[in-house]
Image: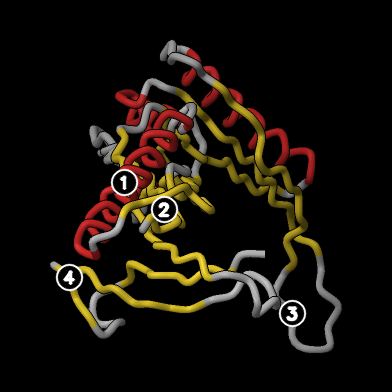
Amino acid sequence: MRRMTMISLVALGAASMTLGGMAIAPTPQHTHDDDDAPDVPVIVVSGEGRVSSTPDTVIVRLAGVARAATAGEAQGNVNESVDKALRDVRALRLEDLEMKTTQLSLNPIYDERRRGEVPRIVGYEANLGVEIRTTSIDKASEVIDKALEAGMNRFNGISFTLKSNKAARMEALAAAARDAKLKAGVLAEQLGVGLGSIERVQESVTGGAPRPLQMRGMEMMAMDAGVSTPVEAGSLETVANVTIIYEIRQ
């Protein structure tokens, strides 16, 4: 079995010798308990790649809440307002429109009694939540405004995402690999050695998930006469990290 002696490219200040903003840290490690195995010197480098993408999909979450004396009346009222809201949203002729129910509840409302008294049901509250997804990002404000004007009275958030983040992930991964390879080349050149075969590669990619947008008081803004809800998509960042272990060629 071979034993690897690692030379790592780590953060500045973590080693005894520095090189142009990079630090060289010889760190002996063993891949096997066999101490008779020959040393195989290696270089360990890490690279990072970042890709900024423009979202192509918006997700709007809204709900209708209604209270009434009876369960049937409460549910009927909320169904009516949500149905009208969804009809109005469909009339916008949005691209790749998807709508689904995300919440449905019907709960009794109790009167306030003193401690020890049995609470009495005085009404019911119905809650119907929906998620609206579309690639017509430029019409996100209209979706919110139409739904709230039609009677939906809860705004539960908005987020932006990509229909597919595969391209962004692969681009970030390629950038991270190039970054690691460049670092390995610089380190090997300064040490006066060559790079041999690759012993190991590890990678991870994060980001590109739906980015929620925090908006306070949007319900009141949108329900005020003549006020349109402002929405900006921003950007999404995908980050990839790659660690490569190279054999050193003497």
Across and down, in percent, residue 27 comes to 43, 78
Residue closer to the observer: 135 or 169: 169
The crowding category of the residue bearing disc 1, from other C-alpha atoms within 10 Å (few below 14, some 14 to 19, many at least 20), is many
Label for residue 50?
1
Q: Earlier in the sequence, mark 3 or mark 1?
A: 1
- Give the tally of numbered discs: 4
User: Would residue 23 be seen by someone viewing this image from the given angle?
Assistant: yes
| Type of amino acid under label 1 | Arg
Q: Is residue 37 above or below residue 150?
A: below
CA gap between label 2 and label 1 equals: 9 Å
Q: Earlier in the sequence, mark 1 or mark 4?
A: 4
- Which residue is rendered at x = 49% and y = 43% of the image? 153
Q: Earlier in the sequence, mark 2 or mark 3?
A: 3
Q: Which residue is mark 2?
A: 241
Q: Earlier in the sequence, mark 2 or mark 4?
A: 4
Q: Are marks 2 and 3 in contact (CB under 8 Å)?
A: no
Q: Is residue 212 above or below residue 8?
A: above
The crowding category of the residue bearing disc 4, from other C-alpha atoms within 10 Å (few below 14, some 14 to 19, many at least 20), is few
Judging from the image, what secondary structure is the residue with disc 4 in? strand
Q: Which residue is mark 4?
A: 19
Residue closer to the observer: 117 or 26: 26
CA gap between label 1 and label 4 equals: 24 Å
Q: Are marks 2 and 1 in contact (CB under 8 Å)?
A: no
The crowding category of the residue bearing disc 2, from other C-alpha atoms within 10 Å (few below 14, some 14 to 19, many at least 20), is many
